[in-house]
Image (cartoon, helix red, strand yellow):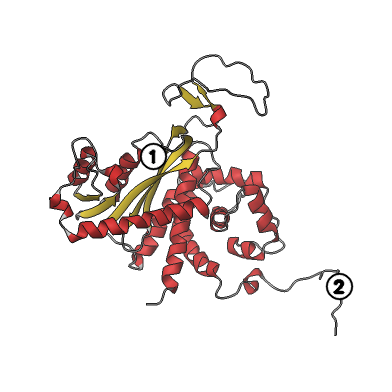
Amino acid sequence: MRGSDEQQGEVFSYLSPESRVRRDHPLRAIRTMVDEVLRALSPEFDRMYARLGRPSIAPEKLLRAQMLQMLYSVRSERLLMEEIDYSILFRWFIGLNLDEEVWDATTFTKNRDRLLEADVAKQFLVEVVELARARGLVSDEHFSVDGTLLEAWASLKSYQRKEGKQSPPDDPGNPTVNFHGEKRSNQTHESKTDPEAQLARKGKGKEAKLSYSGNLLIENRNGLIVDAMAWEANGRAERDTALLMLEQMGGDHAVTVGGDKGFDTREFVSECRHMWVTPHVAQNDGRPGGSAIDQRTTRHEGYRISQRKRKRIEECFGWLKTIALLRKVRHRGLAKVDWIFVFGCAAYNLVRLRNLAVQPT
């Protein structure tokens, strides 16, 4: 018998979002871990908000919504609000009932800025790493570092001289700019829309783009991100942030750190050894003066293992640039880029932890 094409919707619904999400859905395991992290951050949230006044959006719901944007590659906050409005799955993950009104995109962004000022993303990542450490999934001895360029949300047309009067544009919406014959550098030029973005290129023969440097420190056991930091793309960001992250790691036992040829400098190797960190970086024999790593390090089997394991950091960059949509960041300013980059790393760790939990033993 053919069913009727009934267009009138039901007046009442007796099903909760919880009942509409299947028990084996991948988001269930991630939601459990996110809630555990948010409970650990609850005292910090109490210090951020006043006890009196009009209630704002709960920070827990803000962070769950931001997590969904990373996991499902939602390109903007406005589209994210639209997705939440009609998606039962998204409402369940955030903690909204089906009849609750979704926030305005501008309201969501303004409330999220408070979390940015408190550096919640860094604390969120720390709690995720502690969650993995409690499960015995994090190595405390062997690590790898690397960096990548994150293209800034700024056009090369905005890269103009810092000093000097600019002629009025022929078209304010899309001006014509002629840079032929003009030598541009970060010392004399800056972007008018994102002054902290630097003109940089990844290697010889590559085109230069306005970029930030995204840097990671991962552990070698399961490839989980231990620390992350976005920095200005000044040519030294990878080595400087690597030393900073290694110093913040602390501990009183010797560790190893793997890296590519870009880390094979006498300054980096010396600083690592000063911090009781054994540098397992790839040898760059073509550098003037030769490699800073000799056979005292390369003859050990641990060095070869580190060189093999360090390549897993590229998996992190691949996920962050494709799934989390950080190949071209949609935020301006180093503070916001760093916040969204670190939070994306926490999202990657949660996905990795979920996958590790379902792998056969």
Q: Which residue is mark 2?
A: 6
Of labels 1 and 2, the one closer to you: 1
| Amino acid type, callout 1 | Gly
> Residues under labels 1 and 2: Cα distance?
61 Å
Name above or below for residue 6 compared with residue 81: below
What residue lies at 30% left-to-right and 48% top-to-bottom? Answer: 260
| Amino acid type, callout 2 | Glu
What residue lies at 32% left-to-right and 55% top-to-bottom? Answer: 310
**With 340 as the anchor, is 240 left or right in this view?**
left
In the structure shown, which secondary structural element does the residue marked by tag 2 occupy? loop
Contact check, label 1 and label 2, Cβ < 8 Å: no
* Closer to the camera in the image, 312 or 358: 312
* Closer to the camera in the image, 20 or 152: 152
Name above or below for residue 71 compared with residue 265: below
Residue 32: percent from left, percent from top? 50, 67
Residue 43 seen anywhere in this rendered image of the structure: no
The tag on residue 203 is 1
Quadrant of the frame with the C terminus: bottom left
